[in-house]
Image: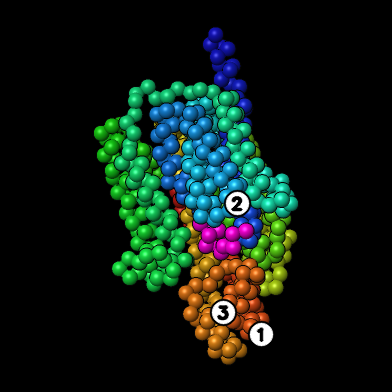
């Protein structure tokens, strides 16, 4: 009997892992589908990059704000049950995206529902792994496979991109709705796992503080470019005469700091909390969470810099964009999936450091590929391949670093914390790099016009000076802006040339920022012991 049990434990159960991988592919792929639909959404809804940035951020903002809660819900009610509710919400959200003709409903209903769905499913995915796979070897393979699934997710949209080019983005989101419904059916093959025997008191105070703090911080950060840093640009309201963006960022940080102290008291009182102290005090856990955040921070930055650049400046359609993104996904998958199998003797600290360095180095060919008049797509693609490899290296070890550093119960709950770090990272990456990109557009436009003031009419110079901010838009939208402000003739030609220069230079600035951020993450590996 014991021998039979040992034999069963030694066999790796692939079926539930396949369902979990398909789920990771779907949640990550949803963001990839949205990114390749950028051009179609801009044209359909006549929106600017501010709305695209918000649409890209909404899923990770909602998911990141509530995933910590989902970790506790999984412990209390069973991760399989939480997983199923998430699949239902994601299905409804994708249907909303497919059917609506209103950008407000698209962002604030469709993207929010998908975000809530993801906030339940992904912590369940990460929480189920420690329950299903007990040995450290099996866990390493399972976590590496989940990381590899993020790479596959960037490959999967190729077919959807082709469909999008032929019949539009609506059918694509309809297919995503069917995909999540299939995942719901597939949950039947996930084994039932034991719940905690002691009934856990739901930490309502912590849930509210975590959600409000994270959402306030991220929405404030994302709106700096639109509302202004200090001087109001186009905010819905002001706070003591200044833009509300920075005060919202500060308020979010204050709430999150207060959350740490509140959760400490709750854990001392109840023995269990939304945010266990082991995740705060354990340096290795923090370093592993940095890695989780980094992977999706780069993905968020990629969505707001690389994709708009190739679609707006190089005229890429959804299919070409998908092929470029596939290059990113191929190397991410290969390194994330095979490193746990063939580099088991290399320390996790070394792998993570190498990953951060590789991502930073990938920026070099990207910058060299972007010229003033054209882009060397071959060199640009090499940069994307290298970036994916760096992401794969980090993805291969960051999750297992966290799970191995805490006790069994906290390892299960770590799914919510890890998933939160991912989505906060993605939202932060989209917000920070998007803000740098849009600020660069405004500053460079004003600086170049000031230098060329003698070549432009006084009326044109005044129109440009009166703009609180300038947008990163396609040629048609910029022409509409010029015509609406009666900038015609020679002035129009010169402003179009200036706009081309600005878009190229601002893209380079944003890419450079990604490289610097990657190097900064090297500092977050010193606490890893394995």
Horizontal side of 73 relative to 321 (left or right) equals left
Dividing the picture into quarters, in which one does residue 201 lie? top left
Residue 332 location (% of width, % of height) = 63, 46
Callout 1: SS: helix
Residue where numbered disc 1 is placed: 489
Q: How crowded is the residue under tag 3: few (<14 C-alpha within 10 Å), some, or many (20+)?
A: few
- Residue 43 in the magenta stretch? The answer is no
What are the residue bounds of the magenta stretch? Answer: 44-55
Q: Tell me what residue is drawn at x 51 percent, y 84 percent.
A: 462
Q: Which mark is residue 34?
A: 2
Callout 2: SS: helix
Question: Could you give the CA–CA distance between mark 2 and mark 1, rounded to whole angstroms?
Answer: 37 Å
Q: Which of marks 2 and 3 is in front?
A: 3
Could you say which is closer to the camera, residue 174 or residue 148? 174
Q: In 3D space, how far apart are the residues under numbered discs 2 and 3 (Cα atoms)? A: 32 Å
Q: Mark 3 points at which residue?
A: 485
């Amino acid at each position: 009997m014991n021998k039979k049990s040992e034999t069963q434990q030694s066999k790796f159960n692939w079926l539930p892992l396949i369902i979990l991988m398909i789920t990771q592919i779907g949640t990550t792929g949803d963001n990839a589908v949205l990114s390749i639909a950028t051009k179609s959404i801009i044209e359909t809804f006549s929106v600017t990059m501010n709305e695209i940035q918000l649409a890209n951020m909404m899923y990770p903002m909602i998911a990141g704000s509530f995933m910590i809660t989902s970790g506790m819900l999984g412990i209390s009610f069973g991760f399989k049950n939480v997983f199923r509710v998430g699949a239902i919400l994601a299905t409804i959200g994708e249907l909303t995206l497919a059917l609506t003709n209103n950008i407000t409903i698209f962002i604030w209903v469709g993207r929010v529902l998908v975000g809530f769905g993801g906030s339940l499913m992904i912590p369940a995915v990460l929480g189920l792994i420690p329950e299903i796979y007990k040995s450290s070897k099996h866990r390493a393979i399972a976590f590496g496979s989940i990381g590899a699934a993020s790479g596959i997710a960037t490959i999967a949209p190729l077919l959807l991109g082709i469909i999008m080019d032929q019949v539009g983005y609506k059918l694509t989101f309809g297919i995503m709705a069917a995909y999540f419904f299939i995942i719901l059916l597939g949950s039947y093959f996930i084994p039932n796992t034991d719940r905690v025997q002691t009934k856990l008191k739901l930490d309502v105070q912590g849930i509210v503080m975590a959600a409000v703090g994270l959402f306030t911080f991220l929405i404030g950060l994302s709106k700096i470019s639109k509302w202004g840093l200090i001087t109001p640009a186009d905010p819905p309201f002001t706070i003591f005469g200044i833009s509300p963006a920075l005060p919202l960022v500060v308020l979010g940080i204050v709430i999150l700091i207060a959350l740490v102290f509140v959760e400490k008291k709750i854990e001392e009182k109840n023995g269990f909390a939304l945010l266990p102290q082991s995740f705060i005090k354990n340096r290795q856990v923090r370093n592993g969470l940095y890695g989780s955040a980094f992977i999706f921070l780069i993905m968020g930055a990629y969505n707001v810099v690389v994709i708009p650049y190739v679609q707006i400046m190089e005229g890429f359609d959804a299919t070409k964009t998908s092929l470029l993104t596939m290059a990113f996904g191929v190397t991410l998958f290969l390194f994330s999936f095979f490193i746990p199998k063939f580099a088991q003797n290399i320390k996790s600290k070394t792998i993570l450091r190498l990953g951060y360095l590789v991502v930073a180095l990938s920026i070099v060919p990207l910058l060299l590929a972007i010229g003033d008049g054209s882009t060397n797509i071959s060199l640009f693609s090499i940069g994307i391949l290298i970036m994916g490899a760096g992401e794969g290296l980090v993805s291969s070890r960051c999750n297992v670093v966290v799970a191995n550093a805490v006790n069994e119960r906290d390892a299960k709950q770590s799914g919510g914390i890890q998933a939160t770090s991912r989505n906060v990272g993605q939202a932060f990456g989209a917000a920070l790099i998007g803000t740098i990109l849009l600020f660069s557009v405004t500053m460079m436009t004003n600086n170049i016009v000031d230098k060329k003031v003698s070549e432009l009419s006084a009326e044109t110079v005044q129109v440009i000076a009166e703009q609180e901010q300038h947008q990163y838009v396609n040629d048609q939208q910029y022409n509409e802006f010029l015509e609406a402000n009666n900038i015609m003739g020679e002035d129009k030609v010169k402003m179009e040339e200036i706009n081309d220069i600005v878009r190229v230079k601002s893209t380079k600035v944003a890419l450079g920022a990604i490289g610097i951020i990657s190097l900064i993450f090297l500092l977050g590996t010193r606490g890893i012991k394995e």
